[in-house]
Image (tube, rainbow, N blue to C red):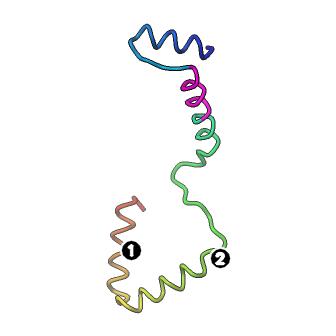
Amino acid sequence: MSAKDVVAKAKGQGIKLSISQVYTARSSAKKRAGTAGTAGRAPRYSGASNAGDEAAFRRLVVAIGVRRADELLADFKRSVGL
C-alpha cells in the first residue's frame, strides 16, 4: 500500500497522518526488524571488553560480602526469570 493510500485510509478513520509520518514509521519498523535477535538470549561479550566490570564486581563482593552478593544475585535471577 502506498503512503498516499495509508494517509487516505487513516483519514477515513479519523486519524491525521502525513506522508512523511508514514515513511518515518516504515523506516523505524525496518530498523527494529533487523535488530530483533533471538528472544531470551543474552548478548555474548568477549572477556576483554568486560574485564573492568568483572574487577568492579569482585571489589563489590569483597565490600558487601559473599553471602549478601549471593542473595542479590539470586534476587536478580528471579526478577529476570533465570
Percent of width and height locating residue 77:
39, 66
Quarter that holds the C terminus: bottom left
Percent of width and height locating residue 78:
35, 64
| Type of the residue with mark 1 | Leu
Instruction: Specify the quadrant of the image occupied by residue 20.
Output: top right
Q: Is residue 26 magenta?
A: yes
Q: Residue at x 49, y 10 (%)?
A: 9
Which numbered disc flags the more N-terminal residue, 1 or 2?
2
Badge 1: how crowded within 10 Å, few (<14), some, or many (20+)? Answer: few
Q: Is residue 31 above or below residue 57?
A: above
Q: Is residue 7 magenta?
A: no
Q: Is residue 52 above or below residue 1?
A: below
Quarter that holds the N terminus: top right
SS at badge 2: loop
Question: In the depicted view, which residue is nearer to us: 48 or 19?
Answer: 19
Mark 1–mark 2 Cα distance, whole angstroms, equals 20 Å
Q: Which mark is residue 47?
A: 2
Q: Which mark is residue 54?
A: none
Q: Which mark is residue 73?
A: 1
Q: Residue at x 55, y 56 (%)?
A: 41
| Type of the residue with mark 2 | Gly
Badge 2: how crowded within 10 Å, few (<14), some, or many (20+)? Answer: few
Main SS of residues in magenta: helix
Q: Residue at x 60, y 26 (%)?
A: 23
Question: In the depicted view, which residue is nearer to us: 40 or 27?
Answer: 27
Q: Which residues are magenta?
A: 19-27
Instruction: Specify the quadrant of the image occupied by residue 22.
Output: top right
Q: Residue at x 54, y 79 (%)?
A: 53
Residue 27 lies left or right of residue 15; in this view the side is right
Instruction: Specify the quadrant of the image occupied by residue 3.
Output: top right
